[in-house]
Amino acid sequence: MIARRCFVAGRVQGVFYRASTRIRAESLGVTGHARNLPDGRVEVLACGAPAAVDALCHWLWAGSPGSSVSAVASEELSPESVQPWPKVFRTT
């Protein structure tokens, strides 16, 4: 299991980006969260099997139909630093 934090920039707030990310994450079996940041970006924490996390992080570039992603920056996290390990994918 791996954990990755992504910061998504562009037109990603108010266009169902977080809800679409949750649906995609759930279909891949990825847990974590998607939340709006004050600077207009969305933070995504993706936890799960490496192939599933990679698939979600790749999908973040597409996003919801109304979104327009200009950048996705990601960082690997040690599984030990993600406590408690998320059991579901949430939007906040």
Image (cartoon, rainbow, N blue to C red):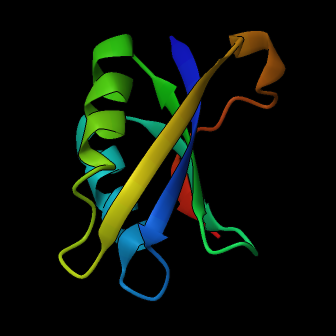
Above-or-below relation of 76 to 45: above
Q: Position of residue 28 (x, y in %)?
A: 26, 36
Q: Residue furthest front?
A: 70
Q: Which residue corresponds to the image point at 72% horizontal and 72% vertical from the top-left?
A: 39
Residue 68 relative to residue 7: left or right: left
As drawn, 70 above or below 59? below
> Residue 61: x, y in percent?
29, 50
Would you say residue 29 is visible in this rendering? no
Residue 56 % position (x, y): 32, 38
Residue under the point 36% across and 85% down: 15
The relative height of residue 22 versus residue 45 in the rendered view (above or below) is: below
| Residue 6: percent from left, percent from top | 55, 41
The residue lying toward the viewer, choosing from 25 and 66, is: 66
Q: Nearer the viewer, residue 73 or 80?
A: 73
Q: Residue at x 28, y 16 (%)?
A: 51
- Residue at 76 percent across and 75 percent down: it is 38
Count of labels in the image = 0
The C terminus appears in which quarter of the rendering?
A: bottom right
